[in-house]
Image: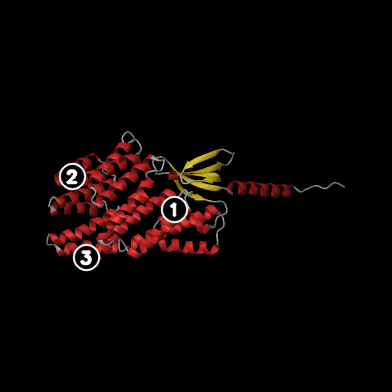
Amino acid sequence: MSFRIPHSAFRILAAAILVLCVAGEAAADQVRQRDAKGSKARTRNGKVKEVSKTEVQLQLTPGDQIAKIPANEIETISYDGQPADLGALPTAARGGNYANANELIRKLTDAGLTDPNMKDELEFYKMYVQAKTAMTSGKLVDMKTARETIDKYMKTSVNSWHYYEAVELLGEICLEIAAVEVESLRNSWYKMAIEEAYTRLAQAPWDETKIRAKISRAKAQHLSKEIDAAVASYDEALKDATGKESDPQIASLMLAARVGKAEVVGEKSPNEGIRLVQEIIAKADPEDSRVQAVAALAIARCYEKDNKPKDALLNYLKVDVLYFSQQQYHAEALYNLSRLWNTLNNPERAREAATTLRTRYPGSVWAAKLGAGG
């Protein structure tokens, strides 16, 4: 007697096979890779085969081609089988939602991740959130503790694709510590930022990162009153950027380096510094709010050195009115507005600027400095 499988069973079987095939294709690691301009990203599927501080090797699917993705172009990596909380963590952390990020970190820590790549993601964001929270608080003891955590991460995760970001974060927190440290100890933090962070960051294989490292080193040297060294570092950055201006990121850094150098020149000759920054502003893209904000702050400081507080105030106001989206620079401008309005006998406007600073950036270094009467 013959046995005949119903046609409906074939349809069910075919659907089941299709579901399994789709699931098999979806079960992959995913790397979000930014484009050359750093503005867009595409998702690349495959299997992460090797991770280092400079690149991630991804075996693409379909096929078996190995893509070597530079670490500085990676936005996020999602690993096959990772908990949903781990996938949500980068967005929470980088979006500044630190309360949510810490809750995700707590749950993931309790879950006890065993995959080395997933554990590194957790450890990086745990360190990242601790550092950002400490810098937001402006509390010296918290920032010093976070600095130790960053240092530990750098030593234990030397082959993480997050390594150079951790190095840059170390420099950032050292400068924030210096801003609120007692004067006799500030130079030691500037030195740490230069030697432990920016010298290492300059060893990265990417032009944009090397240039940014030299600009950051110049800023630290300027803050520590090493004027000639700061000018030399800015010149190095400009030399490295010359001829590469077709890359929007490098073009923006080149303008930032010119602004920084002009301000350093203004330490010795305020009029020359003002002239150089004015030239830069005239040539810069009016829509590049970051460079415009940096330039306005730089020229304001030059005007103050030239004993022209009204001109300085007008440029701080420019940041407050036009470039407030640049939060770091806006906070600095508000602090200086509160100080200069008092100098110019307008206490009401001074209180207004101080209130805005405390309301919008309550945990910033500038709010802490205002509270300390600095």
- Pointer 2 or 1: first along the chain: 1
Q: Secondary structure at mark 1?
A: helix
Q: Amino acid at mark 1?
A: Met
Q: Which residue is disc 1 drawn over?
A: 154
- Pointer 3 or 1: first along the chain: 1
- Pointer 3 or 2: first along the chain: 2
Nearer the observer, disc 2 or disc 1? Answer: 1
Q: Residue at x 45, y 53 (%)?
A: 155
**Contact (CB < 8 A) between labels 3 and 1?**
no
Q: Secondary structure at mark 3?
A: loop
Res 97 seen here = no
Q: Which mark is residue 173?
A: none
Q: Which residue is disc 3 drawn over?
A: 373
Q: Which residue is disc 2 drawn over?
A: 273
Q: Callout 1 environment at 10 Å: few (<14), some (14 to 19), or many (20+)?
A: many
Q: Amino acid at mark 3?
A: Gly
Q: Residue at x 53, y 54 (%)?
A: 118
Q: Residue at x 60, y 46 (%)?
A: 25
Q: Left or right: 320 with respect to 33?
A: left
Q: Amino acid at mark 2?
A: Gly
Count of residue discs: 3
Res 257 seen here = yes
Q: CA distance from mark 3 to mark 1?
A: 36 Å
Q: Left or right: 225 with respect to 198?
A: left
Point out residue 234 in the picture as x, y percentages from the top left corner: 27, 42
Q: Residue at x 32, y 62 (%)?
A: 138
Point out residue 324 in the picture as x, y percentages from the top left corner: 27, 54
Q: Secondary structure at mark 2?
A: helix
Q: CA distance from mark 2 to mark 1?
A: 38 Å
